[in-house]
């Protein structure tokens, strides 16, 4: 099946200057294999971690319980589920167990019995959920924690970087994290960071009524995964600087850039962009960059792919005269603008409205040759809204839009 996964490298232009530094854009394109046996799917090992703090009271909590019960209805024999609820205290509502007919009824009853509490020990609930998933770790399946919250983490570990570090470490052990933020009170940057580092996805749920729909969306993706634990190793020649766009988890280790891309559902495509700065090299003809991809298929077999790209050294004048690949640059600019917009949203939230608006405007001008008229107008309107000041729901909705764009998630 590994042969059915495709891995390609593309560049905006294949020339670099031999007398001055050159900036290039590298595009990594990964397409997951199709489903080989529709009658059989990967076993799921899930941890449902649910915020029961005081702010969740009312219809939010009822919709969450409804969504959790709905997830159980989709699980089959051979799947596992654990349920954790947290407020100030963390409660193991149900330890990880196989979802037999009898256990399904027990799990549903446990969900229905959950009650509202006080503060938000997000880290404690999440880590206990991860621990339960790890207990029943399925080597050939999907092991994921679904973390839902509507508030700020104010008990236990609250630091974004520390929680992200734990998410990355857990992913290396085989446990991934998807996060769901409900309403207006949570920290979207924290939940996105945990999902990025943890190999899962981040969802903003603007209204309680959408909770079951969003849960089902994540669940359908889990059922369709055909490429797991995707990691790309990009060899970086000495002197070349590389920057990964889109907030994908990455690390440069001895001139090898590791990029972790989580899982991919059947036949879905993922496009990742790396901005390169190459040094001058008088007397050289060519610069080659090689990338290796490693993943697991739906039978837990190892997938290995390799691709390379070659740059030709020419004069600065020839570089400037070479047209850029328009379609690639349009896709790249979509991600680059989304990164910049996420940064601007942080500034606007901090009260630096003019600075946020100018950041958007400057990048619209710089990106104009590769932006559609509609996109340009949209970002101009965003800069104007930032100058006036944005409402919380508007910020979060826009953050979700940019998250989807920058990670090229459909």
Image: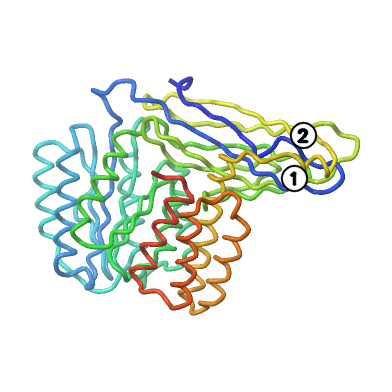
Compared to residue 279, the image places residue 78 above or below, namely: above
Q: Which residue is mark 1?
A: 240
- Is 363 drawn above or below residue 80 in the view shown? below
Q: Look at 25% across and 49% down and name the residue there.
A: 215
Residue 180: quadrant of the picture: bottom left
Residue 202 image position (x, y, % from top left): 37, 53
Q: Is residue 21 left or right of residue 351?
A: right
Position in image of residue 44 (x %, y %)? 28, 37
Applied colour scheme? rainbow
- Quadrant showing the C terminus: top left
State the CA–CA distance, disc 2 to disc 1.
Answer: 10 Å
Task: Judge the density around disc 1: few (<14), some (14-19), many (≥20) Cα neighbours within 10 Å.
Answer: some
Number of marks in picture: 2
The answer to whether the residues at label 2 and label 1 have Cβ atoms under 8 Å apart is yes
Q: Is residue 7 above or below residue 70?
A: above
Q: Nearer the viewer, residue 37 or 54?
A: 37
Q: Quadrant of residue 87?
A: bottom left
Say which mark, if any, is on residue 203: none
Q: Mark 2: which secondary structure?
A: strand
Earlier residue among tags 2 and 1: 1
List the residue tagged with mark 2: 287
Disc 2 residue crowd, few under 14, some 14–19, many 20+, Cα 10 Å: some
Toward the front, the furthest residue is 373
Foreground residue, 361 or 223?
A: 361
**Spot occupied by residue 70 in the image (x, y as percentages of width and height):** 16, 46
Residue in the foreground of this view, choosing between 278 and 337 = 337
SS of the residue under disc 1 = loop
């Amino acid at each position: 099946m590994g042969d059915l996964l495709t891995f390609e490298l593309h560049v905006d232009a294949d020339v670099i200057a031999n007398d001055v530094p050159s900036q290039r854009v590298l595009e990594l394109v990964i397409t997951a294999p199709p489903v080989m046996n529709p009658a059989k799917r990967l076993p799921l090992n899930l941890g449902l971690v649910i915020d029961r703090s005081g702010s969740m009271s009312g219809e939010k909590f009822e919709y969450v319980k409804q969504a959790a019960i709905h997830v159980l209805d989709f699980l089959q024999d051979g799947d596992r589920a654990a349920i954790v609820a947290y407020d100030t205290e963390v409660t193991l509502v149900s330890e990880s167990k196989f979802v037999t007919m009898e256990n399904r009824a027990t799990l549903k009853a446990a969900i229905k019995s959950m009650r509202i509490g006080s503060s938000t020990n997000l880290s404690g609930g999440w880590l206990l959920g991860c621990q339960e998933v790890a207990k029943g770790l399925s080597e050939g399946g999907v092991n994921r924690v679904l973390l839902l919250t509507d508030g700020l983490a104010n008990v236990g570990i609250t630091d974004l970087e520390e929680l992200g570090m734990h998410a990355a470490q857990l992913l290396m052990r085989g446990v991934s994290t998807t996060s769901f933020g409900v309403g207006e009170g949570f920290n979207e940057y924290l939940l996105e960071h945990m999902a990025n580092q943890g190999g899962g996805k981040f969802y903003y749920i603007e209204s309680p009524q959408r909770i079951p729909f969003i849960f089902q969306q994540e669940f359908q993706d889990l059922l369709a995964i055909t490429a797991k634990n995707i990691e790309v190793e990009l060899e970086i020649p000495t002197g070349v600087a590389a920057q990964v766009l889109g907030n994908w988890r990455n690390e440069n280790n001895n001139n090898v850039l590791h990029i972790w891309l989580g899982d991919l559902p059947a036949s879905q495509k993922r496009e990742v962009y790396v901005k390169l700065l190459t040094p001058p090299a008088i007397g050289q003809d060519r610069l080659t960059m090689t990338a290796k991809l490693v993943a697991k298929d739906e039978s837990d077999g190892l997938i290995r792919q390799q691709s390379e790209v070659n740059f030709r050294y020419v004069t600065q004048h020839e570089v400037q005269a070479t047209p850029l690949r328009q379609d690639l640059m349009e896709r790249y600019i979509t991600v680059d603008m989304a990164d910049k917009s996420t940064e601007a949203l942080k500034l606007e939230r901090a009260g630096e409205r003019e600075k946020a608006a100018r950041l958007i405007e400057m990048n619209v001008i710089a990106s104009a040759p590769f932006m559609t008229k509609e996109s340009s107008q949209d970002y101009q309107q965003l800069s104007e809204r930032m100058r006036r000041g944005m409402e919380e729901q508007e910020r979060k909705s826009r953050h979700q839009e940019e998250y989807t764009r920058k990670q090229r998630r459909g």
